[in-house]
Amino acid sequence: MRRAPALQVHDLQVRRSRNFALNVDSLWVDKGSVLCIAGANGSGKTTLIEAIVGLTPYQGSIRIMGRPIDLYPKQAKARLGYVPDDDQWFVPELTAAEYFALLSSVYERSGVSIRAHMSKIVQHTADRLKFKAFDQQLGSLSHGNKKKVQIIAALMHEPQLVVVDELRNGLDPLAIRAAEQLFKSLSARGVAVVAATHDLWWAERFAAEIVMLDQGRVILDAPTGTITAESGSVEAKFLALYGAARD
């Protein structure tokens, strides 16, 4: 019998409006996999991400490490890390150090880990990302440093599945490289990484598997190597599929 994957989505339906609904029949992400979700604006990338991390109501089944998130939300989400593409979850008056301490306290109360261990992970991740602004208030940080805080916060409890929305946004080239290396090292240790992006060149370079969405439906789910072997590039495949869908 196949072991439980890091993420399993089955018969997922999310109704956003009278004119848009997300429908994903099946999505399977193994431990240690790196998958990119790609699609045009309005294709459903953000809706799928928000359903996976529990930020929007849905019908169907979403399992994290084998646990349905609707039946075992605490246990499932304890294994999940999320890097959003905005900073609406920040408390701007807190310093980065205070923010990490607050999150550590929350995790500790949930029985996820101990605060001393998390502080080591925070420092190690910050060192890899060259983040040093621990004493600055979150509201005063640059866009790039805010993104680094989000990455550190997502990884501090050692999740087994990390969901990332537009990793490159706000980061300079050196920070992008450091973040990519960080997530690849996590993947090598068995952590699954799911990243939503509109950057097809980056998706081809970063991910081992590509899922493409169009109008709320999966139009492609294939290994990156297979796509490039057949079409030359992920971008070429994307343009061909989107063109065919509109003919």
Image: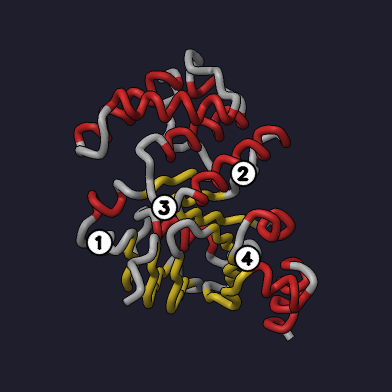
Q: Is residue 94 left or right of residue 178?
A: left
- The mark that comes first in sequence, 4 or 2, is 4
The three-letter amino acid code for the residue at tag 2 is Glu
Which circle's residue, 3 or 4, is located before the other in the chain?
Answer: 4
Residue 109: % across, % down: 19, 33
Name the residue tied to disc 4. Answer: 39
- Left or right, 13 with reference to 109: right
> Can you tell which of label 1 and label 3 is closer to the viewer?
3
Is the residue under label 1 in contact with that under label 4 (CB below 8 Å)? Answer: no
Question: Around disc 4, counting alpha carbons within 10 Å, would you say few (fewer than 14), some (14 to 19), or many (20 or more)?
Answer: many
Q: Nearer the viewer, mark 4 or mark 2?
A: 2
Where does label 2 land, which residue?
180
Q: Nearer the viewer, residue 149 or 244?
A: 149
The image's colour scheme reads secondary structure
Q: Nearer the viewer, mark 2 or mark 1?
A: 2
Query: CB atoms at circles 2 and 3 under 8 Å apart?
Result: no
- Answer yes or no: do the residues labelled 3 and 4 have beta carbons within 8 Å? no
At 78% from the left edge and 71% from the top edge, which residue is drawn? Answer: 236
Please provide percent x and percent y for residue 129.
58, 30
Task: From the image, tell me which residue sits under label 1.
Answer: 70
State which tag comes first along the sequence, 4 or 1: 4
Of pointers 2 and 3, the one earlier in the residue sequence: 3
Name which residue type carries label 1: Asp
> Viewer-proximal residue, 75 or 22?
75
